[in-house]
Image: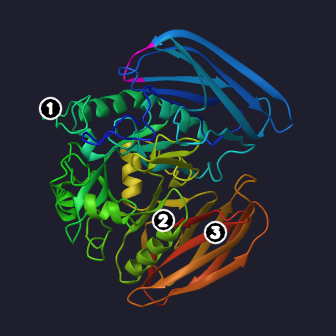
Amino acid sequence: MHYRFRYFPFSRYFKKEPEIILDAPFRVNPNTAIPISLLIKDADIYPIQLMSVSLIVNYPSGHQKTHHHNFDQIVGTHWFSYIFFIHPQETGNLEIQGTIEFNINGKRRVVNTHNIKTTPKSLLHVCVDQAQLPGSDSYYWGDLHYHSNYTEDFVEFGAPLETTNKTASALGLDFLAITDHSYDLDDKYGSWVETDEELTKWKDSREEIRTINTKNEVLLIPGEEVTVKNAEGRNVHLLVMNHESFIPGSGDGAEKWSNTTSEYSIEEVISIAKENALVIASHPFVPFSKLEQRILNRGKWEDNDIIHENLHGLQILNGEVDESFDIGLKNWIHLLLSGKKIFIYAGNDAHGNFNQFHQIKIPMLSTWTHRNQILGQCRTGIIKKDALTLDSSIDALQSGKCIITDGPALILEIEYSNSMALLGDSIQTNECTIHLNGFSTEYFGSLSHIRLIHGIINSHREKTIIDSDLNGFTCEIIEKLNITFSGYFRAEILTSLGKRAYTNPIWVSPK
């Protein structure tokens, strides 16, 4: 909130204070302490004396408990973070009111939840769930698109990795891809426009990820959101994970207003990426505003962009099921029917943002919040086949052994010739048995509908094999089928609260 244009230094949200935010996960697993994080940014410019933080927890029963933490310390660093752990006394939906007291320039200040003056104050809403995430016995759960505080520029920043790791763990996540912007990772510390030839920031991010991963908590996958040129020369984003070196991409970083051309095309970055890297189209069908298109030369993934042979898949679920998701699903199905083996993934593009998404709406004029695109809201589930390591997770994601969801879990397996095919597999058989299992919880709603879909290669349609209403929180369906055409099977499931899960395909051909 401190950036202003040089020759027109007006901003409605500018304030001579550090940015101060309290945050918390939107839900936690049973018997789990709630991590409430305090983040203070830019106190090196506007130092404060942090006096205290009070947290008033309102429980579903009407019971209220206050947690008070005294600090009485000077905060004068660029980043300051602290985590309070609250052990909940009840399950259900909690409302938490946070109050931060501090002194600045000899004046006492008290703010609720945050101090962004153009953003309405609101409570933190946390559900203490009675159950684990659905399907936790069958899947490792993760978020494949997240920005830490190594993303920091004119308009946005993320949260520190250690804070993020604790929050993700409480949520029930097993892995998290750290995909900071390429145009931020090569900046000099303290600057948003100067490039560091030594790549100190990028190197520090890799080292911090390695250090955190030695603690055996949530697995952090090192990644990068690279700005690349699409088929029309416009800037789009590409997620590259587990790549051993930095890939520059500065076209839409607003660091050089006279140059909005990125260093590499999609095809060039895909060719640069090593075999052990995961390469995914980042929210490929999310529309950008006319202002972003004009000033930053932003575009969308075109038909010629998504057919590259070594592109592993599409992140079509980006924080919410919206129109861009529907467009992504249709494009993915079109690719599958044409014979391309390509997978789908989910992430949230959260920049910190554990409880609600804070964002600049109109530069210098307004900010806003919403409850989409927050950490762990949409998830990718990796089949629990091997122990979760960096190598095993990348291998599973590359081969499509995963589902996407914003709530329930869905298992699709195909039994054939005394063997069992998993998601992403290709098999040959003349007859098989389909196994479907669905799981949900009260938090995500009871299961309401399930579909098994058969796609015929080189046709223009999919055929629905199973289309059944459901009732309850688990389901099991077994169906024997004869195979006469080359194609694939995939499945979808829906809950009473509109939450849904989609599997990646299993390809099946007759002998």
In terms of sequence position, does the residue under pointer 3 or pointer 2 come before the other?
Answer: 2
In terms of sequence position, does the residue under pointer 3 or pointer 1 come before the other?
Answer: 1
Residue 198: image tag = 1
Q: Are marks 3 and 1 in contact (CB under 8 Å)?
A: no
Residue 493: image tag = 3
Give the secondary structure at mark 2.
Answer: loop
Residue nearest the observer in this picture, 398 or 33: 33
Q: Amino acid at mark 3?
A: Ile
Which residue appears at 26% of the width and 28% of the height? 190
Residue 39: % across, % down: 49, 28
Residue 52: % across, % down: 60, 15
**Does residue 279 lie above or below 87 as drawn?**
below
Which residue appears at 67% of the width and 63% of the height? 438
Q: Are marks 2 and 1 in contact (CB under 8 Å)?
A: no
Label 2 sits on residue: 423
Q: Amino acid at mark 1?
A: Glu
Which residue appears at 52% of the width and 61% of the height? 403
Part of the protein shown in magenta: 75-79
Give the secondary structure at mark 3.
Answer: strand
